[in-house]
């Protein structure tokens, strides 16, 4: 039935209660428009309801409500009620897992130790989300031919995906939840019809499969680069190194200001902020991290992209989403479309998170669906439905990636690693400043496991671990290294080895670390794990270069016996007088490279004593003394002297 002036009169006079989502520019001048309105009758009344409004072919106008005022109270079909409840359950699930993710990050913080002999431990599963990540588990298996510790938990997500589809993306992933929330605030230019157009499946959604193949190809060559773009590792790194430290610094600054400001009736806020500052929700002390600008830039770019394309990261770049999409091809839960019930309102497409074409007339892309349930909860006619073993007549489970793209992407990953390694050879010419945490595996194996999640940096109580830039070459970007000028390695702390999800830092005990005798023990068990050796810059050391007394480095040395000792030397002053000075020396057989001396050195700028990786236990070729003592219990390159 075709209506013109009558339908326009009903809309402008309010005869029906439906309201348009957006008034198109051409709708304010009815007399200048040639409108064709397709209308249908509301059930149980003679009133007409407009479902499509077009000024030209291909333009569809959509309404917010599906009933008119003559119908009274809206009666929803039972399935629609169920799906709307399930949608609220999905929202609650997203909120729960996002809060859990943040809570575990905050639980990773260890600010201070109760005493110098205190041994901190974390009982909470702070790396739970990383252990649930199937992409990290599969990459680790490809690079090391083994599954480390609790990474078997990823089987839960894999099995669930095989049966239900990409439920992790829509219900659990904290990165997906963050993108989902940001995408609700669309740019004004991306509303109405433009939003419908960008919510259709687009060829760029194949990019993530190419990204996945590149990283899996690199994993086959023995390098875990997947952590650079894995959503869980990326969000953990961004939160740990950028957002939480920034929030921490801001809160401390606000607290310091509130102590001196006259807030009047709001003075109680000082107490509230002070309660937060003293370790309840944030660290009791401020922390800083090196090389964070690029991390912030990438994370900010991902979030801003949601202003223009809903969940652009999830649709086009996320390698974990690509992996789960491949697994979901055989899922038994799928979308079934009923063409006879569809009115073409396009509500299902308007709120689609995956861009998988839920509307009738287009093939549903099963591998792109996030199982958000927005489509079935928005359809007023129950024209689409999720079912077990649905009809595949209107769906396409294929990825539509050409053989050339598959071979090219995998080949790029395979060839990229030799190119990256050609710029530096950590096995033969290690960077002297590249001091890894205690328990770290030999460099080649370390890089084959580390996913750059930043958990070890977050848990360090002294803010000693920081992300690298090019110290380990392009292959090792954002992996952890010790920066003793900012913080030193606590002698009784092994937290970094406890939170590492992949075993790049092998889990060790305080007795195996053996830097100081433990309580109740006179001696340590076996030789200590050394991560480096201290060296003096005699041109900057006060006793050596300027004849000034200074024993700070020796006072801070934690080993027993101390690795720094003094030589009593008679020196002639400028006035010709003779005096005795204590000139410090380092005993390389005792020094473990903790960095406490460098941290405490009073010489500003470049310190008078610095730490290098020379003498580290994990690399036999990087030692200065022959060591016939029993090797430590964790893996070193004593087991294999062949450079890979």
Image (spheres, rainbow, N blue to C red):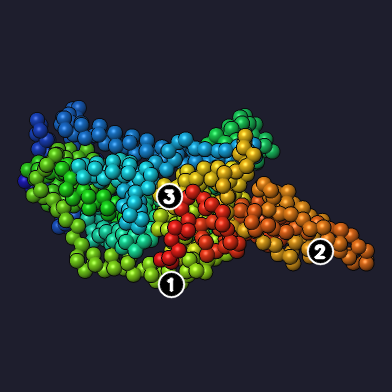
Quadrant for the C terminus, please. bottom left
Query: Looking at the image, which residue is at 62% across and 44% down?
Result: 516
Specify the label residue 546 is tagged with: 2
Dots 2, 3 in contact, CB < 8 A: no
- Say what secondary structure mark 3 lies in: loop
Proximity of marks 1 and 2: CB atoms separated by less than 8 Å: no
Q: Residue 536: which quarter of the image? A: bottom right
Where disc 2 sits, the SS reads: helix
Give percent across and percent down for residue 117. Answer: 63, 38
> x, y percentage for residue 392?
10, 48
Residue 493 picture location, percent across and down: 56, 43
Mark found first going from the N terminus, 2 or 3: 3
Q: Which residue is mark 3?
A: 503
Instruction: Decide which of 294, 126 is in the foreground and name it.
Output: 126
Q: Secondary structure at mark 1?
A: helix
Toward the front, the furthest residue is: 628
Identify whether 344 is placed above or below 73. below
Q: In the rendered structure, which disc, 1 or 2, sits on the residue that comes first in sequence?
A: 1
Residue at image point 50% right, 69% down: 428
Query: In the picture, residue 203 is in which quadrant?
Result: bottom left
Q: Which marked residue is nearer to the observer: mark 1 or mark 3?
A: 3
Q: Is residue 393 left or right of residue 406?
A: left
Sequence-wise, which precedes: disc 1 or disc 3? 1
The residue labelled by disc 1 is: 422
Q: Nearer the viewer, mark 2 or mark 3?
A: 3
């Amino acid at each position: 039935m075709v209506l013109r002036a009558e339908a326009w009169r009903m809309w402008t006079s309010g005869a029906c209660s439906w309201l348009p989502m957006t008034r198109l520019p051409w709708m304010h001048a009815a007399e200048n428009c040639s409108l064709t309105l397709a209308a249908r009758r509301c059930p149980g009344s003679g009133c007409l309801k407009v479902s499509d409004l077009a000024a030209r072919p291909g333009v569809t106008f959509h309404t917010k409500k599906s009933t008119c005022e003559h119908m009274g109270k809206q009666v929803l079909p039972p399935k629609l009620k169920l799906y709307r409840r399930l949608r609220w359950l999905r929202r609650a699930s997203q909120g729960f897992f996002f809060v859990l993710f943040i809570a575990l990050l905050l639980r990773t913080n260890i600010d201070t130790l109760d005493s110098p002999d205190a041994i901190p431990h974390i009982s909470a599963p702070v790396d739970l989300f990383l252990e649930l990540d199937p992409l990290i588990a599969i990459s680790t298996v490809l690079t090391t031919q083994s599954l480390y510790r609790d990474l078997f938990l990823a089987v839960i997500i894999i099995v669930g995906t095989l049966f239900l589809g990409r439920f992790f993306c829509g219900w659990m992933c904290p990165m997906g939840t963050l993108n989902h929330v940001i995408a609700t605030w669309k740019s004004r230019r991306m509303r109405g019809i433009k939003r419908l157009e960008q919510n259709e499946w687009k060829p760029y959604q194949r990019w993530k499969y190419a990204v996945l193949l590149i990283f899996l190809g690199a994993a086959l060559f023995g390098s875990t680069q997947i952590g650079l773009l894995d959503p869980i590792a990326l969000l953990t790194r961004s939160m740990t190194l950028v957002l939480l430290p920034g929030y921490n610094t801001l809160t401390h600054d606000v607290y310091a200001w509130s102590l001196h400001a006259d807030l009047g009736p709001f003075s109680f806020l000082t107490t509230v902020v002070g309660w937060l500052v003293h370790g309840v929700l944030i660290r009791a002390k401020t922390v800083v991290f090196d090389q964070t600008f690029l991390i912030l830039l990438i994370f900010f770019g991902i979030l801003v992209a949601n202003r223009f394309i809903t969940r652009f990261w999830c649709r086009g770049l996320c390698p974990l989403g690509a992996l789960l999409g491949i697994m979901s091809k055989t899922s038994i839960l799928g979308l079934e479309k009923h063409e006879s019930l569809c009115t073409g309102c396009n509500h299902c497409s308007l709120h689609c998170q995956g861009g998988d074409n839920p509307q009738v007339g287009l093939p549903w892309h099963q591998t792109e669906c996030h199982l958000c349930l927005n489509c079935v909860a928005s359809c007023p006619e129950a024209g689409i439905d999720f079912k077990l073993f649905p009809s595949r007549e209107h769906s396409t489970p294929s990825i539509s990636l050409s053989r050339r793209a598959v071979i090219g992407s995998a080949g790029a990953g395979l060839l990229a690693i030799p190119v990256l390694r050609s710029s530096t050879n950590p096995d033969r010419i290690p960077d002297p400043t590249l001091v890894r945490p205690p328990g770290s595996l030999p460099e080649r194996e370390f890089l084959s496991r580390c996913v750059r999640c930043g958990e070890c940096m977050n848990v360090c109580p002294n803010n000693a671990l920081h992300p690298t830039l090019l110290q380990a070459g392009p292959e090792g970007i954002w992996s952890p290294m010790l920066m003793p000028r900012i913080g030193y390695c606590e002698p009784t702390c092994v937290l970094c080895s406890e939170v590492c999800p992949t075993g790049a830092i092998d889990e060790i005990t305080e007795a195996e670390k053996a830097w100081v005798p433990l309580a109740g023990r006179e001696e340590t068990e076996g030789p200590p794990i050394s991560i480096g050796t201290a060296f003096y810059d005699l041109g900057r050391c006060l006793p050596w270069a300027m004849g000034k007394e200074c024993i700070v480095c020796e006072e801070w040395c934690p080993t027993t016996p101390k690795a720094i000792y003094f030589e009593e030397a008679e020196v002639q002053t400028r006035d010709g007088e003779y005096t005795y000075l204590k000139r410090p020396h380092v005993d390389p057989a005792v020094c473990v490279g903790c960095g406490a001396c460098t941290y405490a050195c009073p010489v500003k700028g470049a310190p008078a004593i610095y730490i290098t990786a020379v003498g580290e236990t994990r690399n036999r070729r990087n030692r200065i003394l022959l060591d016939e003592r029993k090797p430590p219990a964790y893996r070193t390159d004593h087991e294999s002297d062949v450079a890979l």
